[in-house]
Amino acid sequence: MMQTDSSAPDPYEISGEVIAAGTRQNIAIPVSQSVSGLSANLALQVIHGKQRGPCIFVSGAIHGDEIIGTAVIQRLTALLHPETLSGTVILAPAVNIYGFVQHSRYLPDRRDLNRSFPGNPGGSLASQLAYCFLENVIDRCSLGIDIHTAAIHRYNLPQIRVASGSPYLIELAMAFGAPIIIESPLRPGSMRALAADRETPMLLLEAGEALRFDRHSIAIGAAGVLRVLAHIGMIAADDGLSHIGIPLRANRSLWVRAPRGGVSRRRHRSGDIVHRGDVLAQVGGLFGEDLMDVLSPLDGIIIGHTTLPVVNQGDALFHVAEVANFENAGKQAGSIIEAISVSAPPFPAEPLLDEDEVH
């Protein structure tokens, strides 16, 4: 747990603005001009605590249509109070403001912001925005929490993704309290990979569906961030680890695809535990004829599913993560170290790809 100093901190300076201890302030950092000539900004809220402590960030909408993080951050603004905060929290509710406004995952130049780090102040629009976020946010912080959702017409079970091989990240992920912890290697150009290069720990929350708010995902996201802040000593609250349960953990997953085009009838959804050979759905023709079963390829838990019943052959219907610790999940452990060691998967970590990255 990070230690805090009870003495008053210095004012916090960012992009020419000065925030006094025990206050909050909204900051707009210019990035570029839009087509209309108006300035497009990186919008931040800086909550600078009355007591000393670490600086962390919470970000949403790195992909512009993944807006659950925006709702989580809006809730956090009402729950975090600078008068009782130790340290500084930087909230970034819509990092990719261009895609956010256009309801698009990408920037206007069709680049993926989360594949554009560390960026370049003289590069493409995506590169300039990535560099702006690096300079003003990532490089100032000792921890980051980045919030994503599934693609459009897909839903992700709330899940925390962390880099493999880090007991500290597993500890933070356990404090967050999402239904499952997934260990996945870092991908070049991503914010997580950049933060790792700078030795900044990062949690990535996947939850919900693009362009949709859902209460379950928002509640898990906001509560999880608060528990992490409590765990590292920034707020006075329960971090949830006084009674430690062994979490579900995975680092391998498979996409299950439609065997034919037609109309699907789903029998399972995200959060369901399934076994190899279980019927996840059936796909038939327009009259319900010639039904074909969609079977689970492994024992695991469904961490994502399509919300669109009309499918083409080859469409991704389910994302199933292999889980190694069903027999232990939910049991009480005597310590965090015990919970981490008991739940460690025995197989090597593999990338967990978004559907639009899978061929």
Image: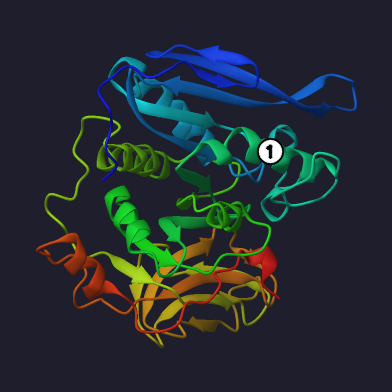
Nearer to us in this view, 159 or 268:
159
On the image, numbered disc 1 is attached to which residue? 96
User: Is 239 on the left-hand or right-hand side of 59?
Assistant: left
114 above or below 312? above
Q: Quadrant of residue 127?
A: top right
Residue 59 in sight in this render: yes
60 above or below 268? above
Q: What is the x, y in percent for residue 275?
A: 35, 82
> Tag 1's secondary structure?
loop
Estimate how packed mark 1 is, as few (under 14), some (14 to 19) or many (20 or more) residues with alpha carbons within 10 Å.
many
Q: In the current view of this chain or complex, which residue is farthest to the bottom? A: 277
Q: What is the x, y in percent for residue 90?
A: 49, 30
Nearer to us in this view, 56 or 286:
56
Question: At x 32% / y 48%, what residue is drawn?
Answer: 176
Question: At x 65% / y 21%, what residue is drawn?
Answer: 15
Q: What is the x, y in percent for residue 278?
A: 39, 83
Nearer to us in this view, 91 or 200:
200
User: Is 9 on the left-hand or right-hand side of 58?
Assistant: left
What residue type is disc 1 on?
Asn
174 above or below 283? above
Question: At x 39% / y 72%, what residue is drawn?
Answer: 250
